[in-house]
Image (tube, grey):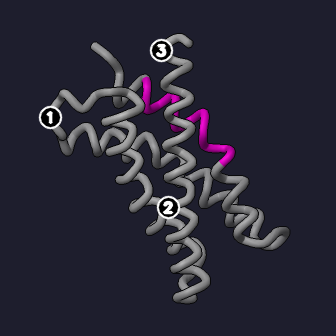
Amino acid sequence: MNRTALEFFRFGLVGLVNTSVDFAIFLLLYRGLDADPLAANCIAFLIAVTNSYLLNRHWTFRASSAPLSMANYARFLVVNSGGLVIGTLAILLLKGLLLVEWAKLIAAGLTLIWNFSTSKLLVFKTR
């Protein structure tokens, strides 16, 4: 398996973990605390993206030899904000047609390629 394929596989596994974190926090806020679904989505995103950054930095892209930097985390947050936009738009557009939870799952599927590509090319690129 070449390096990019291995990274994509690992990214997918980390994505499953983070999707679970994101979805669990979303459900806790939306169903458990009766939060607005768009606000719940944004809060869940911020917690999950921080977890994603740490796992992808350490395991997926093996970039943990470089010191943690707020600039690199900020870059990761910015490029993954595309995923937040996709997820939020999916919820906004689909919540009248489907259960909000299904819209959330559809959004997760739509963001995989964007998040992997931008993470590999812009955040964890090897020099």
The residue carrying pointer 1 sits among few (fewer than 14), some (14 to 19) or many (20 or more) residues within 10 Å by Cα, namely: few
Q: Residue, x 22% and y 40% (percent of image)?
A: 71
Residue 94 image label: none
Q: Residue, x 38% and y 52% (percent of image)?
A: 51
The residue carrying pointer 3 sits among few (fewer than 14), some (14 to 19) or many (20 or more) residues within 10 Å by Cα, namely: few
For the residues labelled 3 and 1, the Cα–Cα distance comes to 22 Å
Mark found first going from the N terminus, 1 or 2: 2
* Residue behind mark 3: 3
Q: Could you tell me which secondary element the residue under label 1 belongs to?
A: loop
**Residue 115 x, y percent position in the rendering:** 52, 38
Is 111 colored magenta in this rendering? Answer: yes
* Residue behind mark 1: 67
Mark found first going from the N terminus, 3 or 2: 3
Please say if 32 is above or below 95: below
**Residue 40 x, y percent position in the rendering:** 52, 73
Q: Residue, x 51% and y 17% (percent of image)?
A: 4
Q: Is residue 1 left or right of residue 76?
A: right
For the residues labelled 1 and 2, the Cα–Cα distance comes to 25 Å
Please say if 9 is above or below 37: above
* Residue behind mark 2: 21
Q: Residue, x 47% and y 60% (percent of image)?
A: 45
Instruction: Locate the C terminus by quadrant.
Output: top left
Which range is magenta?
109-120
Q: Amino acid at mark 1?
A: Pro
Q: Are marks 3 and 2 in contact (CB under 8 Å)?
A: no
Mark found first going from the N terminus, 3 or 1: 3
Q: Amino acid at mark 2?
A: Val
Please say if 43 is above or below 83: below
Q: Are marks 3 and 1 in contact (CB under 8 Å)?
A: no
Q: Could you tell me which secondary element the residue under label 2 belongs to?
A: helix
Q: Amino acid at mark 3?
A: Arg
**Residue 56 x, y percent position in the rendering:** 39, 38
